[in-house]
Structures are given as structure tokens and as C-alpha cells.
């Protein structure tokens, strides 16, 4: 049995399938995730959507996402500039709170479609020493 929470959203711009989506800053719509600090809300289904159309996004549960780099099984992931799943960043000069979208269920390399348990959250990454 499968238990996902899937919600339809207006796509402010074209959204590709199996991409991380984020709330638009000023509109009642979503866009492809464009950074690891964006308000991530889910993963688009495989069909995606045209601009102005409706995109179904899995907000909780098991789905698939496009990997944006090398991922280890079990890694918590966030979004890159193309809405792909990438590993959390290493500590940098400044502390940052990174938005996460879930945990990948298999190892992957860039371009792979990988299973993910979607569960939006955030992680504080302290500054490096």
C-alpha cells in the first residue's frame, strides 16, 4: 500500500517531472526549487507541468526525484538551482539554515532518478572553525 500526500499547485513557470518544488515568494504558486534556502514544499510527479498549469507535488511519502550529484543511500537532501536533489553543503564561513526535502533511498549519481521519502524540514549548518 502507498500513502503519499499529493497536492495540486499552480505552476508559475514550467516545472519538469521529478523535480523539487518550492513556494513562490509572492504568488499562490510553486516553482522549481532554485536553492537550498528556498521554501521547499515537495517533489513534482513525473508529468511536471507547463507554466500556468497545475503540477501535482508529493509533499509527504515515497516518490522519485532527479539527482543533481553523487548521493549516498540514506542522505538528507536539498535542492540545487535546477530543482534536483543534492547533498547538504559542508560548513562554510557563515552559518546557514538549509531547507531539506527528504531522505534518498538509494545511492545515485547526477541525472539518476532516485527514490526519496519526502519530508520537508530544515537543518542548521554552523560556520566552519
Image (spheres, grey):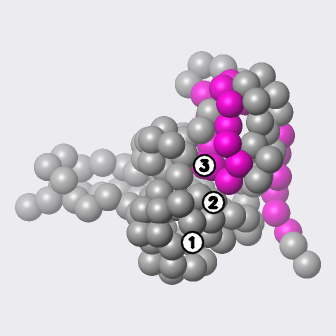
Q: CA distance from mark 2 to mark 1?
A: 9 Å
Mark 1, other Cα within 10 Å: few <14 / some 14–19 / many ≥20: many
Q: Which residues are magenta?
A: 3-24
On the image, which quarter does residue 121 sit in? bottom right
Q: Secondary structure at mark 2?
A: strand
The disc, 2 or 1, on the residue closer to the chain's N-terminal end is: 2
Which residue occupies 81% across, 57% down? 5
For residue 84, above or below residue 105:
above
Question: How far separated are the C-alphas under marks 2 and 3?
Answer: 7 Å
Q: Secondary structure at mark 3?
A: strand
Residue sitting farthest toward the top? 26
Task: Report x, y in % for residue 17.
Answer: 71, 48
Kindly check if marks 2 and 1 are in contact, taking CB atoms under 8 A apart as contact: yes
Residue reaching furthest right?
A: 1
In the displayed structure, 107 sits above or below 26; it is below
Which residue is at a point 73% across and 69% down the rendered structure image?
Answer: 62
- Label number found at residue 71: none
Asked if one can make out residue 10 in the rendered structure from this viewpoint, the answer is no
The residue under label 3 is 20
Q: Which of 127/51 is in front?
A: 51
The quadrant of the picture occupied by the N terminus is: bottom right
Q: Residue furthest left?
A: 129
| Percent of width and height locating residue 97 | 37, 49
- The answer to which of 29 and 113 lies nearer the viewer is 113
Please tell me which of labels 1 and 3 falls first in the chain: 3
Mark 2 or mark 1, which is nearer to you?
Answer: 2
For label 1, the residue is 104
User: Where 54 falls versus 122 (above or below)?
Assistant: above
Query: Are the residues at dot 2 and dot 3 in contact (C-beta closer than 8 Å)?
Result: yes
Image disc number at residue 65: 2
Amino acid at each position: 500500500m502507498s500513502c503519499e500526500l499529493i497536492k495540486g499547485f499552480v505552476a508559475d513557470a514550467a516545472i519538469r517531472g521529478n523535480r523539487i518544488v518550492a513556494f513562490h515568494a509572492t504568488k499562490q504558486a510553486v516553482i522549481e526549487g532554485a536553492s537550498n534556502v528556498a521554501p521547499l514544499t515537495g517533489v513534482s510527479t513525473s508529468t511536471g507541468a507547463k507554466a500556468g498549469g497545475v503540477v501535482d507535488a508529493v509533499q509527504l511519502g515515497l516518490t522519485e526525484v532527479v539527482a543533481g550529484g553523487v548521493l549516498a543511500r540514506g542522505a538528507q537532501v536539498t535542492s540545487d538551482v535546477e530543482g534536483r536533489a543534492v547533498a547538504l553543503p559542508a560548513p562554510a564561513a557563515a552559518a546557514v539554515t538549509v531547507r531539506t526535502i527528504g531522505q534518498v533511498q538509494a545511492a545515485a549519481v547526477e541525472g539518476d532518478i532516485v527514490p526519496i521519502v519526502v519530508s520537508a524540514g530544515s537543518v542548521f549548518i554552523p560556520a566552519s572553525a
